[in-house]
Every structure is written in structure tokens, then in C-alpha cells.
Image (cartoon, rainbow, N blue to C red):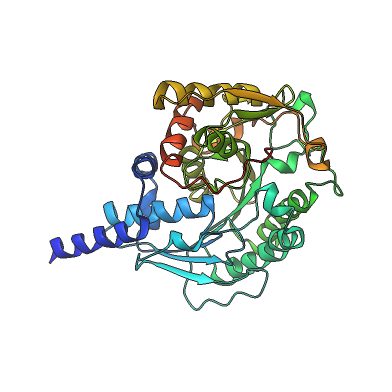
Amino acid sequence: MAILESFKKEIHCALFMSNHPVIEQDLKEISERIAGIAYNLEGKTLLITGGAGFLGNYIVREISYLNAKVFKTPCKVIVLDNFITGLRDLFNGDSNVNLIEHDITKPIDLPENIDYILHAASIASPLFYNKYRIETIDVGIFGTKNLLEVARQKNVKSFVFFSSSEIYGDPDPKYVPTPENYFGNVSSIGPRACYDEPKRIGETLCVNYHEIYKVPAKIIRIFNVYGPGIRLDDRRVVPNFVVAGLKGHGIPIHDEGRHTRAFCYITDIVTGIFLILFSDHNGEAFNIGNDTQEVSIESLANVTSEVFRNEFNINVNVSKIISPLDVYAKADPKRRCPDLGKIQRAVGYNPQVDLHEGIKRFIGWAKDQKVDHIEMKHTL
């Protein structure tokens, strides 16, 4: 009987994930890194919003992996998503995952007991949040308040709000790497405001729900995450560069490509999310990212070209193009890099995947995806 149940678990896991070997490697790596705390999820119920998106879906996959490989009693997962940018075909069979199509800006009524909440719902790509500006504002403000009410009513053990490094805006160079106590340099009426300002208000809601109602809310400010599963058509810089290479185009960088970002591979971000989820640091904000990987966009293009050539035997050139004269490009922050001192001291967070390895894994996954239909546009 035990063998039959184990076999059923493996089948459910395979049906749900249909995972690429790179993703399988990632999930195994995450499970090993959180082995000491993952037991908190065994037999519990976790609610995750935005589970059909990039980060949210990786977390759902990781829990399915733990259910199949580690837990004796599975963790039940409730996924809420309205599929405005999320993908429906990411879910196809795990009996422990209950997928509910719902707009979280509307009231949320769930009969189940809920132990943990991860609020990952957001429209993070500039391509999409410029298209869905009001929806982006609504999910960051009204969606967050609705989820905090659920957390309050269900008396959850922990709640994590997925904020963003965008709340820092274009930081003063004196505050790069940027610590959590930097207040930011953000325009409330700029082209990024429909994304930035709801994240800032969402953080305010979390802190006040903690202070007034004792909701165990934590805030994570995520820096430039990339990896398998990200939409290859969302025109953020890493997928754009990789798609360009796979389509046989030169990697396009604007002007001199001097702006910098600190890119963080998804396994490091997901590991950090679980570390914060199971911590006691309520009412606080934490940067999550990679503090050793701040590179210029030109350097990122060169690394991507090098990985294509050395790891996949594909020659890809880097080409400089004139920056698009649009308002979004003019508002592009010049530098973005986290100070990770706080999260390192609090929960021992330590990113482990360097840029070369991360780009290698990403290309290894992306080369097996369909890219012919993706139009090459400028990066965002």
C-alpha cells in the first residue's frame, strides 16, 4: 500500500509539473536548501495569489516537489489567479493544488483553514503594467487589503507580501547598494508609478495590519529575478537577450548600456522567500536578491553572448542600438543593487547562483521553448 501511495504521489507530481530538467534541478536544489524549515508546511494549507505567474508558480511547483519527495502528509495549496498575465497551462493534475480563478480585488471568501499566505499577485513586467495600469494599481492596493483581511480572519501563522526594488525608484548613488531604511527616490506621477506606488501602499498596509491587528505580515523587496518559467515575451532584459540569441539576432543594448542591475537567479529568490515566511520578523521589510552581481546591461549582454558560445556552441553578437525615445526609457533607474546585510543577519540568506551559471540554466530551458512567434522589441 505504501508503495502504491508513493507511486500515486510521483504520478501526481509528474502530471502537475511536466518539468524541464533545468526546473527539476532547481526544485531539488531549493528543497535541499530549505530542508531545515520546509517541515513547517507538512500537513498545512498555503494560500498563494498569482500562482500562475513566474515566481508564484515556481513556489507551487516547489511545494508539489516537497509533497512528492519529502512530506508524509501533503501541503494543500490554494492558488488564486485571474490570469490577466498568468498562464493556465501551468496546472494540469496535482490533487493537492486547488486552482481558483478569482480577481483578488474583489472580496475573498474561502471556507478552508489557512496556515500561510504568500501574496505574489502583481503585474511586474513594464510591458503589461503599462497596458493594465488601473488593474496594477488595484491589485497592489485593494488586493493586498483583501488578503490581509483573510490573514486576519484566518489567524494565519505567517503572511508575506511580494514588494519590489522598484519602491526605491532611482536611488541616490550614496545609497547603492540600497538598504531597507532608504526611503526612495520615486515619482508618484511617473511612467512607473502605477507599479511603484501600489507596492509602497501595500507595504504600508502590511505594517499597519501587523501593528493594529497583529497579523504576522512580512515584506520582501525583490531585485531583478530571472529564470525558467518567466514569460519570454515580456521584454524584460534577460529574456529579451536570450530570445534574441535563440532567434539568431544580435543581442540589442541601448546606447552604451551603462545602467546597472543586480540579477538574481530564481532558486536564490525562492529560498529567501521561504526563509522569511518561517521567520518571526513581522512588520519588517527585507531585500531579496544578489548583492555580488551588479553588472551593466552591456556586461550582461556580453555574458549572455559568452554563455551561448561556450556552453551551446551558438555565436551571438552584441549590437548597440539607439535608445527608444519613450517616456519609460527616460525614467529607467541608473543603478539597482541590494544591501543584503539585514536578511543575512536575520535568516542567514546567502545567494549561491552566479550570473554565468544562472544564464546557462536559463538558456538551457529557453532553447526548448517556442520563440519563433516572439517579436523582437526594445528591452524594458
Quarter the C terminus occupies: top right
Q: Residue at x 69, y 49 (%)?
A: 127
- Report the side of 310 relative to 332 (left or right): left
Quarter the N terminus occupies: bottom left
- Report the side of 319 relative to 352 (left or right): right
| Coordinates of residue 379 in the picture (x, y in percent) | 67, 38
Q: Residue at x 33, y 42 (%)?
A: 21
| Coordinates of residue 152 in the picture (x, y in percent) | 60, 68
Residue 154 vs residue 202, the one in the foreground:
202
| Coordinates of residue 92 in the picture (x, y in percent) | 38, 65
Outermost residue to the right: 189
173 w.r.t. 78: above or below? above
258 w.r.t. 144: above or below? above
| Coordinates of residue 256 in the picture (x, y in percent) | 73, 21
Residue 146 visible in the current orientation:
yes
Q: Residue at x 36, y 66 (%)?
A: 96
Image quadrant where residue 240 sits: top right
- How many numbered discs sit on the rendered protein? 0
Q: Residue at x 75, y 39 (%)?
A: 168
Image quadrant where residue 263 sits: top right
Residue 296 visible in the current orientation:
no
